Amino acid sequence: MAETTTPTREPARRVFATELNDSTFTFKESDDERAPVYVLLPTGEQANRVLVVGTLTETEDVGNEQEYWQGRVVDPTGTVFVYAGQYQPEAAGALRELETPTYVAVVGKPRTYETDDGTVNVSIRPESITVVDQATRDRWVLETAERTLDRLENLDAETNEYGVRAREEYEDGPDRYRSAVVEALEGLDETDAAAETPDA
């Protein structure tokens, strides 16, 4: 009996804003027109889908004739922009209706866009935008810090083809992303301290 293989969804990589915004190099693993497009993370892994959790601070309809929503999501290391239109109706509806500021979890595909001056910007085309609580946000920060450090540890391994490519494509070395991890964890400590301080 012949086996049928159903395409599986790529895992959503946990990645901080600092690293995602630096992930400007894209590639495909095959010449197939429908092959997934990956961004190359500077820490040496490919990502077709990402999971970002942070504070949705602003939403705006930036479309001309049709609704096209932009959301600004801030994590402890920086800002990520998400864009949703008619092909992402649930995510667009979330950006239309959500109050700001609020914690959200965004799962989606990273997209790159080159501006007229040659700068490459990275954004997320969301599959889902879900309201979460602070505990979920904090857990994501800890898990993302752990995953980032794991990727950095494996970056120089000779068997890591993505690590080799990342070192070729990106000028910034691993110290930038170690610093982002420290910044994120320190941000958590400050949040905890503020939560424990009673109002005067």
Image (cartoon, helix red, strand yellow):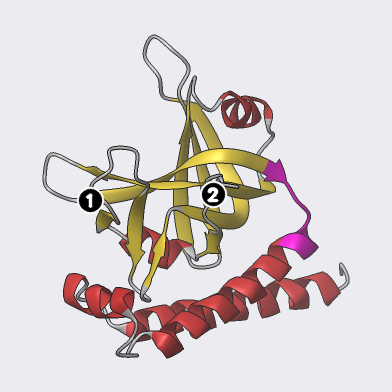
Residues 115 and 26: in front is 26
Sequence order check, earlier mark of 1 and 2: 2
Residues 58 and 91: in front is 91
Mark number, residue 120: 1
Is 64 located above or below residue 160 in the figure? above
Mark number, residue 102: none
Q: Secondary structure at mark 1?
A: strand
Q: Position of residue 141 (x, y in %)?
A: 63, 70
Identify which residue is drawn at 34% across, 50% down.
122
Q: Are marks 1 and 2 in contact (CB under 8 Å)?
A: no
Q: Gap in Å between the C-alphas at discs 1 and 2?
A: 19 Å
Mark number, residue 73: 2
Q: Position of residue 174 (x, y in %)?
A: 34, 84
Q: Secondary structure at mark 2?
A: strand
Q: Is residue 133 magenta?
A: yes
Q: Position of residue 95 (x, y in %)?
A: 60, 31
Residues 102 and 170: in front is 170
